[in-house]
Amino acid sequence: MTISLKLRNYMDRCGVEFDEVPHAYAFQPSKAAEATHIPGRRVAKGVLVRAGDEYMMAVVPSSKLVAFGDLGRWLGREVRLADEQESVSLFADCELGALPPVGAAFGLQTILDEELLDAEDIYFEGGDHRTLIHVQGQDWRRLQHDAGHCALSA
């Protein structure tokens, strides 16, 4: 498996050019950052969360964790981590646990950590555990144009 077809189609619709960066198998985005010698702050990690009855995508640097309390306060409701089995139907064309941090491609509201707003370029999983997608900062912001943002990482 390579890049998710849903993600690829969304990036095409947004006019976003990207590079694929292959790497050794890495189950976590932080390990993919290490494998490719890219600083973790430049690798975006998607985390599927459940806020009330709604699934959302929280996006933080791979070197950080989602601060669920801060995110819940920002949203005004309780937030919990969704388990991997809950992601199967939402991310059917992705390997288990390889969630692209572009919720809009999958019909999900996205909340970005503020640290990812002004990046010159960003890397992220494209749907498998062997490929990072690289986009320029302006293209990253184009992909996330409907995303909310707050300080949500710890």
Image (cartoon, grey):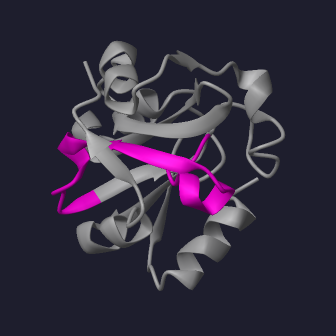
Residue 153, relative to residue 22: is it above or below?
above
Q: Position of residue 19 (x, y in %)?
A: 45, 70
Q: Quadrant of residue 88?
A: top right
Residue 19, relative to residue 148: is it above or below?
below
Seen at 47% across and 86% down, the residue is: 15
Residue 124 shown left or right of residue 140 in the figure: right
The front one of 41 and 142 is: 142
Residue 82 shown left or right of residue 94 in the figure: left
Seen at 57% across and 83% down, the residue is: 13
Q: Where does the C terminus fall, quadrant-wise?
A: top left
Check if residue 48 falls in the magenta segment: no
The front one of 117 and 56 is: 56
The front one of 1 and 121 is: 121
Seen at 28% across and 25% down, the residue is: 153
Check if residue 119 falls in the magenta segment: yes
Residue 45, relative to residue 8: is it above or below?
above
Mark yes or no: residue 38 visible: no
Residue 119, relative to residue 151: is it above or below?
below
Q: Report how many numbered discs are placed on residues in the image.
A: 0
Q: Position of residue 93 (x, y in %)?
A: 79, 52
Residue 20 shown left or right of residue 92 in the figure: left
Residue 27 shown left or right of residue 73 in the figure: right
Mark yes or no: residue 5 visible: yes
Seen at 35% across and 65% down, the residue is: 140
Q: Position of residue 29 (x, y in %)?
A: 46, 34
Image: magenta residue range: 99-121
